[in-house]
Image (cartoon, rainbow, N blue to C red):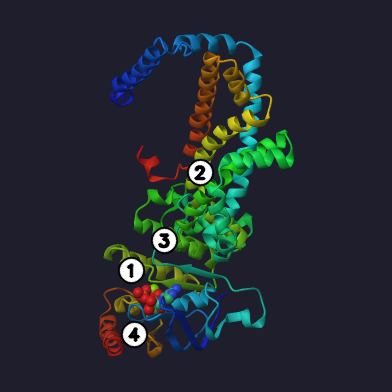
Amino acid sequence: MKSRLFAGAVPRLASVAMLLGIWYAAAWMPAKPLLPPPHQVLIYLVQDVQKPEIWKHLGVTLMRIFLGFGLSMAIAIPFGIALGFSAFARQLFGSWVVIGLMIPSLVFIILAYTSIGLNEFAAVVAAALAVVWVLTINIWESAKAVDVKLIQMARAFGLSPIRIVTSVVLPQLAASLMASARFGLGLVWKMVLFVELLGRSNGIGYQIEYYHQLFDLGRVLEYTVFFVAIMLLIEVVVLGGIERRLFRWRPAARLA
Amino acid sequence: MSVSIAIRDFAKEFQTADGSRLRVLENVDLQVTPGEFVTILGPSGCGKSTLLNALSGLDTSFEGKVEIGRSAVGAAKPRIAYLFQEPRLLPWRTVRGNIEFALDAARVPKLEWAARCERWLQAVGLASFADYFPLQLSGGMQQRVSIARAFSIEPELLLMDEPFSALDEITALRMRQLLLSLWEADRRTVLFVTHNSLESVYLSDRIVVMKSGPNSRICDEIGLGHLRRPRTYDDPAQYETQRAVLATLMRYV
Ligand SMILES: Nc1ncnc2c1ncn2[C@@H]1O[C@H](COP(=O)(O)OP(=O)(O)OP(=O)(O)O)[C@@H](O)[C@H]1O
Ligand SMILES: [Mg+2]
């Protein structure tokens, strides 16, 4: 038990130390007076998390992320499954997805703001549009791997087509949907910062841009570190927890 | 409780990769009376699974007529259970969950689920494994779950596509015994596919032999009324019959 817990502790500690070392070295280089050392960022952070301001910005950003993420998944799941299973859907929408994937995210953000307006809804749509294509392709790929034999079994027992999707296809897709969800969330939150920077007046992305204008790199890094830490927590605790619960049936879970 | 089967002038073509058409089955005729255990014996690739797929309703694009029992009268669709070569259990559901899945699909009222799970898991000797996941069971146990699942919906017709051919010999012997003891309790119509002549003789009332494809059809028929039930593995009459069945089979490959 002990050896497992501490296995690799030395190289991991060394990796953190090295990172901090590089940061300090860069901060103390005479040519770069703007980059603050890590402890300065930490001090900012400790001060700011005691004030409501940073939490307020976090709240709006998280809201946009979850709405954008939810919207993109709600579109990508049915389309991805349809593309995986139906030749007709592939002929109809296959090229849309490929083209959508090629269009730079910036274009979608500009399009959303100019056609919908500079509002919350446009921000969510922009974030969703920027990532929905790659998510759809992801789910499309995994739909190809669904076990047709189980579908046949369900049909032979007389299960209705809708129930086959919900009880046989979706559970098989769950693993790859989970992977897509993690991947999608990672993409959406980067897009949301971009979306905020281009057209909102609050949120973490806006704050980062604001401090950038003031050349306050310490605050920029403070917001970045804060936000990354929160997203990491969501990723590991929330999504990781769901994943463990969802895949109890796997043999790996039995060996553990 | 059980249904009859009438297959008349059945034919099936597949589109092959190069665009031409492959006529797998032609002029297939088969009548099965209610409660009869009929085995289809034929070489690999002759179209046995193809025929079962048509009977089960999985495949609807064939020529000819396929009638199952009272469905012709316009009554509710007959209850069909299909046992495959592999267990085909849903790995994310427990053993009980898998049986409930079939009960749900077959529209068995929820009130009966617990009793039926209990009864059929008991029947296949897996009552204490109800809360296991399939991947926690051996291959033979998984196939027993799939047998319990098939019987649990109390089907009027059981279609079995080489359900024991992937098992080791000892397990397969036990499974055949189990199958017969379950079947003899309330004889449901069974159409059983195999290429094992010994298995076909041990299990069935009648064997129909298919020739090798393409254009395969049923070309011979062997009644087994002279073999008494319950059957045992050490009945010499069975060995005699098996030799005759094997000789017949060899004539058509
Ligand atoms: N979907 C399909 N498309 C094209 N050809 C098919 C298809 N399904 C089956 N066939 C062909 O039909 C023939 C019969 O197949 P089938 O699976 O019914 O044989 P089988 O008698 O069940 O063989 P086995 O005993 O090996 O299971 C084979 O030649 C096979 O290649
Ligand atoms: Mg077959």
Q: What amino acid is at disc 4?
A: Ser
Q: For mark 3, give the secondary structure.
A: loop
Residue closest to the eye, A25 or A226: A25
Q: For mark 2, give the secondary structure.
A: helix
Spatial separation of the CA atoms under disc 4 and disc 3 = 27 Å
Please, which chain is the residue tagged with disc 4 on?
A: B
Q: Residues within 10 Å of mark 4 (few under 14, many from 20)?
A: many
What residue did someone put label 1 on?
A: B165
The disc at residue B212 is 4
What residue did someone put label 3 on?
A: B87
**Callout 4–callout 1 Cβ contact below 8 Å:** no
**Callout 4–callout 3 Cβ contact below 8 Å:** no
Residue shown at the point (58%, 42%) measured from the top left: A130
Spatial separation of the CA atoms under disc 2 and disc 1 = 38 Å
Q: What amino acid is at disc 3?
A: Pro
Can residue B224 be seen here?
no
What residue did someone put label 2 on?
A: A180
Q: Is residue B202 placed above or below A247 in the rendered structure? A: below
Q: Is residue A198 placed above or below A19 in the rendered structure? A: below
Spatial separation of the CA atoms under disc 2 and disc 3 = 30 Å
Residue A119 falls left or right of residue B216: right
Q: Is residue B210 placed above or below A99 in the rendered structure? A: below
In which quadrant of the rendered view does residue B41 lie?
Answer: bottom left
Can residue B226 be seen here?
yes
User: Where the C terminus of chain A falls, by quadrant?
Assistant: top left
